[in-house]
Structure formats: C-alpha cells, structure tokens
Amino acid sequence: MRALAHSLVLVLALAALPATAQQVRYYDLPRGSGPHDVAPAPDGTVWYTAQRSGELGRLDPATGRTEHIPLGPRSAPHGVIVGPDGAAWVTDSGQNAIVRVDPKTKAVKTYPLPENISYANLNTAAFDGNGILWWTGQSGYYGSVNPATGEVRVWDAPRGRGPYGIAATPKGEIYYVSLAGSHLARIDTKTGAATVIEPPTPRQGARRVWSDSKGRLWLSEWNSGQLSMYDPATKAWRAWMPPAKGSRVYSVYVDDRDKVWIAEWESNAIMRFDPATEKFESFPSDKDGARVRQMLGRPGEAWGAESGRRVRMPMRLLELVYFMLPAYVANMSPPFTRFWHGWNAPINRRLLGDHKTVVGFALGVAMGVAAAFVQSRIDWERSLWPASSWLAVGVAMGFGAMAGDSAKSFVKRRIGVAPGKPWIPFDQLDFPIGALLLAWPLVTLSWTDAAIVLVFTFVADIAVNHVSFRLKIRDTKW
C-alpha cells in the first residue's frame, strides 16, 4: 500500500506485447497535489498539473523525486502540454490565463484572458502547425495565444458551454470536442471560425480528442461510454464499447504506433485499443478509485495521473448523496401542498389514508425530475449517471420515492398503525428503497453503496423532519 494519496502511472508499452507482458509502474506524489493532466517532457521528466495546490509538478522517473512550481495566486491548473519550444504550457482556470513554465529557469509567465472574459473555465490546449497555441474553455469559449507576440484571442463557441478536449493533427489542424454540447468541431486556424461536426451518437458527451498518424480523430465519449473515431477524409464515423459495465471513458491518447489508450473509470483501468484487431487490453489500477484523467506519452510509454484518493469514503458518500438528490427533493416536496388551497384529494383514503394525495404524489415526481434536470446542467464529472439520462433518472427517482412512501402507508394501514404515527425505521427507508429499486438499472451501484445510502438517509431524514417540524412545514417530528 502506498502511503501517499496520489500518483502518476506509467505503462511501458513495449512493442506489441500483450497486457500481461507490459510493465506498470507507479510514482507517488506529494499529498494534496491533486494531479489532473500529465505531459512527458523531452528531457525524460514528466510534468503534471497539481490542481489542488495550484502548482505545476515535475517528476523525475529515474529517481522518483518531484518538485512543485507555484503558478500564481488563485491558481487551479487543469491541462498541461509541452510546446514546440520545450516549455510546459498550462491552462489555468483559477487564474483565467494560459501559463508558460520554462523547464530550465522555472520562470513562470502568464497570458491572461481579456478582462471581458471573467471566467472561461480553461481546460486543455494544443499547438497548431504554425506554433500558435489553441485552448478550450468549458464556459463556452475557445481561443489562441501567439507565443511570439503574446496576443491572446477569444471566440464564442458556436453552441455555447462545453468546449473540453482539443488536439492537433499531423498536418497542424485543430479540432476540439464539447462535453456539454456533445459534438466535435474543427477550427479554421486562419479565421478562428469553428465548424461543428455531429457525431452519430446523440448526447454522447465527447470529452477528449486525439489524432492518430493518419489524421483520424479519436474521441472519448463520457455519457455514452464509447470510444469513437472520425475520419475527416471520408467523413465516416465508427465506435467501440469498452469491456466495462456502465463504461465511463474519460480521456483518450494515441501513441506513436497508433494504438489508442483510454482512461476508463468504471473498471478503474487504463485500456489500450488496437484498431487493427479491434480489441481492448486492460491495465487495472492497484488502488480503488484511481480516476486517471488525461493521458499522454512518448515512444514506448503511456502516462496518466491518478487523481483519486485512497481514502475515498467521504467522496463516495458525496457521490451517492448527489446521486440520491432527486429522491430527497421528491420526498421533501409533498408537505408543501399544505400551502395549496385547490383540489387535492387523497389517492385512496381506505388503502393509503388521508395524507397521500394526488397533488402531493405528482409534486414529488415533478420535483424529482426538476432536480435531475438541474444536475444535468451542472454535469458534475463525479455524477454516477450521464447528463443525457436526466429524464429517466428523474422519473425513476421521483416516482420511486413516492411509490415507496405510498407502499409503506399501505402496509401501515394493513397492520393497524394510525395515520401520522411514527413507524421507525420504515418511515425513513421507504422512499430511498423505492428510488433505488427503480434507478438501479440506470447506474452501476454495489450493495455496499446501497447500504451507505440507506444508513445516511435514515439519519438525515430524522434530522430534516425535526427541522421541518420546527419550521411548521410538517405536523409531526417523524
């Protein structure tokens, strides 16, 4: 067990050996660095963005030693690449600037975005054939930096928010993908205009893109879980599904032999895809929740940064609570019908009692769907379901929560528990069980996850109900 929280992972991709013959090495990084993207340098070292500490890290694989270079106040570096000048170029969303770090002097130079662009949410960068750096901003921008003159230019993305991964082809052409917009786009490097190219899979959530030696573009599709390929010469698309249940492909990188590498989160592995055989080989991490993000490499090597923590229970709990939010919102909604003075008849007084009403049930389902929609717009990268599934998840969570609550009321009537009387623990577990049952086919959950949800919900439901009683939203504490 490694003592530190984060690491870089190296897969020695020797010739065409199978996965079992490859060598995988791990390099510990300082605790709290939060590595995001990685870029091997010509001198044998490896750059990585230390997003949480606001620094650029550099690893010497020969010794395992690391050094961190502060990038500036409020720094939150996301992507890093090595430019034609040999320097490290960083997209720093915290400083809203492109940052250059000299590999010899460690001098840091920033290229701030124009003042009218308050927060671009800078993501990744690539150099075109003329030595101009192009970058993406998830807030709905892309732009360029001319290293020779220092000029920074910005364009509005043709479909708003979402520009994420970006790559250059061997000819120096620039393409980017939009995670929120679910498309590929080609940038005219002379005019700056972007032309949208529609993938055949709708709402696929294209996250990263890379070019092979033939100029074909390889895309990691976060929502659909596919690895896809677009050939600009023929305008043809192809797609492959990795061998992982509920696949979530974060990033893609193509090595010098045109083998395609992806970071696949659900199986907690780096995978290599051979376009010739159309087969995947898997390199699972040696720790849970590794969450490898952008990959890069050099001949014979494929590198990735493991951004996940070994102690992951707090984050997993947060992921599960976020996943259950539509059900929680749905469950809290019916009591507010007391402020509604229109028609609101009981669903069935004899079977369910007076408290389960038509308007209350419908409001719960509607608010569950609304909560899922809001989550789809946030599109948190740790969400357990793709943003494109918001309607299915919202209905499953909302209806499941209401159905579970109604089923509990039905049983209470049958065994003679008076309406409004507490029935612990079923009063607390009815709606999460209903929501989990209907949402289970839509996500990948373990029995441990389900247990965590039920324990957390039991405690939280009691606390929320007591607060609601004091605020006079509920008539009882339970």
Image: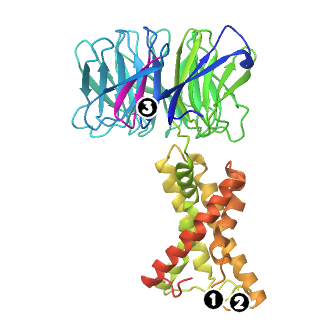
Q: Main secondary structure of the magenta part?
A: strand
| Number of numbered tags placed on the structure image | 3
Residue 400 lies in what quarter of the image? bottom right
- Placement of 300 over or under 239, stated as above or below: above
On the image, numbered disc 3 is attached to which residue?
Answer: 30
Question: Which of the two discs, 1 and 3, labels the residue nearer the N terminus?
Answer: 3
Up the image or down, 242 lies above or below 14; here it is: below
Which residue corresponds to mark 2?
Answer: 417
Q: Position of residue 243 (x, y in %)?
A: 73, 32
Magenta residues (range): 46-60
> Which of 38 and 353 lies nearest the eye of the viewer?
38
**Looking at numbered disc 3 in the image, what kind of residue is underneath it?**
Pro
Residue 108 visible? The answer is: yes
Closer to the chain start, of discs 3 and 2, is 3
Q: Nearer the viewer, mark 3 or mark 2?
A: 3
Around disc 3, counting alpha carbons within 10 Å, would you say few (fewer than 14), some (14 to 19), or many (20 or more)?
some
Disc 1: which residue: 421
Q: Amino acid at mark 1?
A: Lys
Q: What's the CA distance linking mark 1 and mark 3?
A: 54 Å
Where does the image place residue 290, in percent across and percent down from the top left?
A: 58, 35
Q: Secondary structure beneath disc 1?
A: loop
Q: Residue at x 74, y 16 (%)?
A: 18
Q: From this viewpoint, is residue 232 visible?
A: no
Q: Do the residues bearing badges 1 and 3 touch, measured as CB atoms within 8 Å?
A: no
Work out which quarter of the rendered image holds the C terminus and state it.
bottom right
Q: Are marks 2 and 1 in contact (CB under 8 Å)?
A: yes
Residue in the foreground of this view, choosing between 20 and 396: 20
Answer above or below: position of 475 versus 429. below
